[in-house]
Image: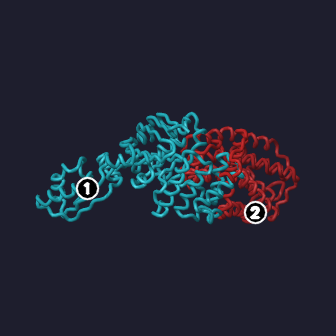
Chain colours: A cyan, B red
Amino acid sequence: MPEFAVVAHDIVRLFAKGEVRALDGVSLEVPAGQVFGLLGPNGSGKTTMVRILSTILSPTSGSATVAGFDIVKQPNQVRRHIGLAGQNSTVDENLTGFENIRMVGLLNHLNKDFVEAKANQLLDDFNLSDAAHRTIKTYSGGMRRRLDLAAALVASPPILFLDEPTTGLDPQSRQDLWGIIERLVEGGTTVLLTTQYLDEADRLAKQLVVLDHGKIIAQGTSAELKKQMGATVLALNFTSSDDAVRAQTLLASLSATPANLDGTVLEMTVDNGPAVTADALRRIDAAGITLGGLALREPSLDDVFINLTGHKAEDVDAPAPTGRPGRRPRKANA
Amino acid sequence: MSTLPSPVSNHSALRWAISDVLTMARRNLLALFRVPVAIVFMIIQPIMFVILFRYVFGGAIPIVGTSYVNYLIPGILVQTTMFGSVGTAIGLAEDLQKGLIERFRALPMARLAVLAGRTVSDLFRNVLILAIITGVGFLVGFRPTGGVVAYLQACLLMLIFAYCLSWGFAYVGLAAPNAEAAQAITFPLIFPLAFASAIFVLVSTMPGWLRPFANNQPVSQTADAVRGLMLGQPHGQSTWIALAWAIGAVCVLAPLAVNKYRKVA
């Protein structure tokens, strides 16, 4: 295994006859043996990047190697070294859990006896033994994701692509999946994870890139990004929007980035929460403004985006470039 | 891991391609038998046609040289295998819609195994339907006199015809936005072929402007050949014409479907 499991250089992908730039020059290097996070809101290009790196989709321009193999010139070698699982859990609903893993194993050209033994072992590892011979139709959302991941692991791929593996899952199922991913990395697997959750990226990923509109807008370790984003969000609630507007001017010098004003709520990202809060309260009091409420909290992905781009993550409203609009509604995250 | 048997088998690329096609076909058949409604519909529809034409319309349809039931059943078998190949369109559209084809694209499997596996499983399904409808035919009075070998030859001809056609429906399945649309698109394609044909009635009873089409189109040629073989009657060159149609069709339709498969997803 080379030092970098995945190296991508200036990947561009256009959709809808060039009208949509899903990826606009993305370069990244994923070190072997750790979790690399691709963070971004819906429509930022995360899923398109994973589809390109896993050879499902070809890039419009740019180049990439996965496990040292070129994704365009050596797709079959790439496919032998990767596993793919994610939000669009692509298991066959009419097959049982065992049959799904068996199918993926055989299509990976593994020996039948090996595949069957491995399928049972994976079902056991992922706590699916009791449901092994039930059709996927009867599985819960969390069970489907676990099975999808188990099937992706049947050929023990050194590189795993996980596309929003916990989106839409309940908290317990998320925790379970995080545990599984951490154990895989301990075993030497490289994981490229896409997520829209900051806590997930924070918990799992050593290195992160933040994507927006198909471009990388920030990268570094989780700690570096947090520092860049500001450690804390100060949220102030006023009794009228006029007061909030006045306070925005009063407090502008307290934060390196512009505050976000939404009705009567003013939010700003600050480095030293308690000290800045005390300062802010003094200024508000001196101006004779009544404060309705106050909170200090950890930054969310929204805050990251406001900080880095000046707009909210939900405002990103690029069409889902699946290549065939409206075809696969569950593929909305591109 | 140490307790597991050796992971990799060393086979040639061709052997892996065949193995991939069979894995896909097996998966399709497993899924088929898990959806009882689909199986019931697949068998009920041709049985309804048999009953409808044998007992409701049959008495009003003039036939020369044999009984109507003997004329009808070979035609119904051709129609049923042709309708059976529509399943290729529906199955592929579903796989595409559910994102399964994407999953398959990230696997080191033979590229064409998704299409070939689907057409092969639909071929197996047609074998099953042929056996069942033959049984139903015997129950309603069908008495083929052409002998067992000719009967099997006729079945083989129908299967080849339907298999070649299913490559066309593979294209439809890949081009349609979803399974329902795929089914809707196939209907106007097969309706004129099935009904403006020698399946249910003699073409000579049709108006003059329709006869040239009805006489020469591939379904009529196949029906004439199948009927001739099953009943031991002369049927001219229709077997060869039907085969030529089938092979000509697959030569055009298979590259279309393959090309479409490369483009989707």
Q: Position of residue A152 (x, y in %)?
A: 58, 51
Q: Is residue A303 above or below residue A4?
A: below
Q: Is residue A8 visible?
A: yes
Q: Position of residue B161 (x, y in %)?
A: 73, 46
* Residue situated in front as seen by the camera: B24 or B87: B24
Q: Residue at x 52, y 61 (%)?
A: A142
Q: Where, quadrant-wise, is the C terminus of chain B in this rendering? A: top right
Q: Name the side, left or right, on which A149 lies relative to B49.
A: left
In the picture of the structure, the residue carrying the numbered disc 2 is B54
- Decide: marks 2, 1 in contact (CB < 8 A)? no
Residue A273 is labelled as 1
* Residue situated in front as seen by the camera: A205 or B42: A205
Secondary structure of the residue carrying tag 1 is helix
Pinpoint the chain carrying mark 1: A
Q: Quadrant of residue A214?
A: top left
Q: Disc count in the image?
A: 2
Q: Residue at x 66, y 62 (%)?
A: B34
Pinpoint the chain carrying mark 2: B
Q: Quadrant of residue B41?
A: bottom right
Secondary structure of the residue carrying tag 2 is helix
Q: Please tell me whether mark 2 or mark 1 is closer to you in this view.
A: 1
Q: Position of residue A31 (x, y in %)?
A: 48, 41
Q: Name the side, left or right, on which A218 lies relative to A76.
A: left
* Residue situated in front as seen by the camera: B232 or A181: A181
Q: Residue at x 34, y 55 (%)?
A: A300
User: What is the three-letter code of the residue carrying label 1?
Assistant: Gly
Q: Position of residue A137 (x, y in %)?
A: 58, 63
* Residue situated in front as seen by the camera: A243 or B137: A243
Please tell me if label 2 and label 1 are on a single chain.
no
